[in-house]
Amino acid sequence: MARNSNQVPNSKIAVYPGSFDPFTNGHLDVVDRALAIFDKLIVAVAANPEKRQPLFTVEERLGLIRASLEGRDRVEVASFTGLTVEYARARGARTLVKGLRAYSDFDAELQQALMNRKLAPDVHTVFLMSGFAHIFVSSSILKDIAQYGGKVSDLVPPPVARALKEKFR
C-alpha cells in the first residue's frame, strides 16, 4: 500500500469516525483524549447517504468541526464514504477511536468493532470514555433542545451553538 505523503514514518495515526451531527463537547473531549495517545488524529465525517437526513450537510459539519478544533495541532478533519476500516487503511491508520457515554453505546460500538476486526484484523478499535460532564449528551438530544429554543451553548463548541441557533431560527 502506498504511504500517505504527509505521514511521519512509524507515527501513530488514528481515525475518529462518526456522523458528528452536530459535533459536541463530548466529541471534543474524545479528540483531546485521543491526542494524548496518538501522533495524529483524523476526525472523519461519515458521508453516508443511506442514513436518515442529517441536520447539517457534510460540508457544514466539516466546517463546524474545523472551527471547533482551531488551534489544535495534529488533527485533520475529512469526510469519507464506504467502509471505515478501508478508509483508515487508505490513510495509514491502524486504529479507530470511538467515544463511549453509556453501556448502550458500548453494545452498539462493540458489534461494529467486532465486524471491523473481521473485515480488517490489522485495524484496532480503541474505546475512550467521555468525561462525566458529557455523559448524558447525545447529538439527537441536542437537536431536540435547540429546536425548541433551549440552551445548548454549554454542551457544544461555540461555532456549533451559533449554527444550531441559526438552523432553528
Image (tube, rainbow, N blue to C red):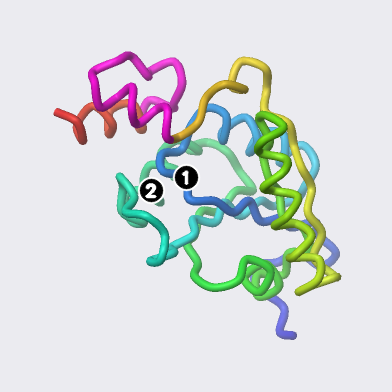
Nearer the observer, 114 or 94: 114
What amino acid type should be assigned to the residue bearing mark 1? Phe
Badge 1 vs badge 2, beta-carbon distance below 8 Å: yes
Q: Tell me the SS state at disc 1.
A: loop
Name the residue that disc number 1 marks.
20
In the image, the segment drawn in magenta is 140-158
Say above or below: 26 vs 47: above
Residue 68 placed where, x, y %? Answer: 45, 35
Nearer the observer, 5 or 47: 47
Residue 28 placed where, x, y %? Answer: 57, 33
Callout 2 environment at 10 Å: few (<14), some (14 to 19), or many (20+)? many
Q: Is residue 162 left or right of residue 155?
A: left
Residue 152 placed where, x, y %? Answer: 37, 19
Q: Is residue 63 left or right of residue 74?
A: left
Name the residue that disc number 2 marks.
61
Callout 1 environment at 10 Å: few (<14), some (14 to 19), or many (20+)? many
> Residue at left 43%, top 27%?
157
Residue 134 among magenta residues: no
Residue 164 circle label: none
> Residue at left 34%, top 50%?
54
In the displayed image of the protein, which residue is found farthest to the bottom? 1
